[in-house]
Structures are given as structure tokens and as C-alpha cells.
Amino acid sequence: MPVIFKPVNAWVAAALAALFMVGSLAFMIESRAMILRSGAEVVLKVVPVDPRDLMRGDYVVLLYDISQIPAEQLDRGSEPGGRMLPVWVRLKPGPEGIHVFSGASLEKPVSLADGEVAILSKPGFIGLSTDPLGAPPPIYLTYGIERYYVPEGEGLVIEEARNAERTTVAVRVSDSGTGQISRLLIDGQSVYAEPLY
């Protein structure tokens, strides 16, 4: 005997599916807003590297001083390397209010010095090889803050400032190490600020 679905059950299922989708979207938006609202702010120097994302528009590629760290500065603990692993990077306030690298480890820091903030990288390859002189190669890391979307036609000004090393980015970092760009600055002046919602 064929199973016949009652219309009421279909409406309930559709309502539950819609509620789930709206709830998921609200959770993603609120997670980002929570970091921007209450995360610790660090200012990072952008280093030189004109893409366009067909889905989202113009964006600027941002690389940071902390995108490459010296392998010998990584506290590996018991982990030998040679795998894709996230890295905790400690930042301390430096000259002109720009945060600089102060250490890295594969484990979340138990404690931080006064003013230090720890940001968690995306998994990066932690190699074992060394160059012919015996020095380990640098470790290249990303943090999920390497693209900044701008209004159409305004990316060139930011790229020129970035290439002239006049650009910094204010990043809010949550307790879990997730970073969100909150402001983009040129010559220390805020030119774009991210809204909470």
C-alpha cells in the first residue's frame, strides 16, 4: 500500500527546514559580530604582494609580517612536524602601535605576557627539511584575513598604499584565536570599518 503524506506534515517539515537554515545563517552572522564586538584588537602591518572575486566583487589581497614565521621560533612540543597543523602565533605591541611576532607554538598558550594576544592560523604545512646550510625553511601561515572586500573601483588606491607599505589592518581576535578584520587603515587613518551586521 503506497504511503501518502499528509499536507500538514509537509508544511511542518518545510517550516523546520526553513527555521534550521535561518538559524544557521543567524549563528554565522552573530559569531562574526561577537568577535568584532568583544575580541582583543591587534594592528598588523600589511606587506606588498588585483584580483576580483566574481561572486563578491573587488578585493585586496593582504599578507602580513606574521604570514611567514621563522621555523626555529616554533615551539613544536612533542609534535615532530611534517604535517598540516594550525599554529598559535603570539603577538605583542610593537613600535607605532603595530603588533609584532613574539612566538609560536602548536599548543594554545597557557598564559600570555601583558599586552600579548594569540591568534590561531589555518592549518599550514610544518616541514622537517632544511636548506643546504642547515637552516629550516620559514613557515608560511594564513589566518582567514587575507582578503578584504572593497567597493567597486576602490581597490587600486588600497593596493597602491599596500605596495608602498602605508597600510595596516586592525584585527579583532577572539579568545579562541579567530581573527576578523575590523578596520583598514592607510597612514594610520581608518578608511574602512566593518559593520557588526
Image (cartoon, grey):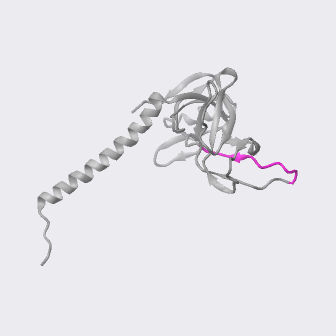
Residue at 60%, 48% in the rendered image:
86
Task: Give the image quarter of residue 23.
Answer: top left
Question: Does residue 173 appear left or right of residue 3 in this picture?
Answer: right
Task: Residue 53: give x, y in percent of width and height.
Answer: 51, 47
For the stretch drawn in magenta, the main secondary structure is: loop
Residue at 75%, 42% in the rendered image:
70
What segment is highlighted magenta in the picture?
A: 132-142
Residue at 14%, 76% in the rendered image:
2
Image quarter in which the N terminus is found: bottom left
Image quarter in which the C terminus is found: top left
What is the number of callouts on the image? 0
Task: Residue 25: give x, y in percent of width and height.
Answer: 35, 44
Question: Does residue 142 appear left or right of residue 82 in this picture?
Answer: left
Can residue 96 be seen by looking at this rendering? yes
Question: Can you say whether 47 is above or below 22 in the image?
Answer: above
Can residue 49 be seen by looking at this rendering? no
Residue 8 vs residue 77, the one in the foreground: 77
Task: Residue 69: give x, y in percent of width and height.
Answer: 71, 41
Taking the magenta stretch, the answer to whether it contains residue 8 is no
Question: Can you say whether 158 is above or below 143 in the image?
Answer: above
Task: Residue 104: give x, y in percent of width and height.
Answer: 67, 40
Residue at 29%, 49% in the rendered image:
20
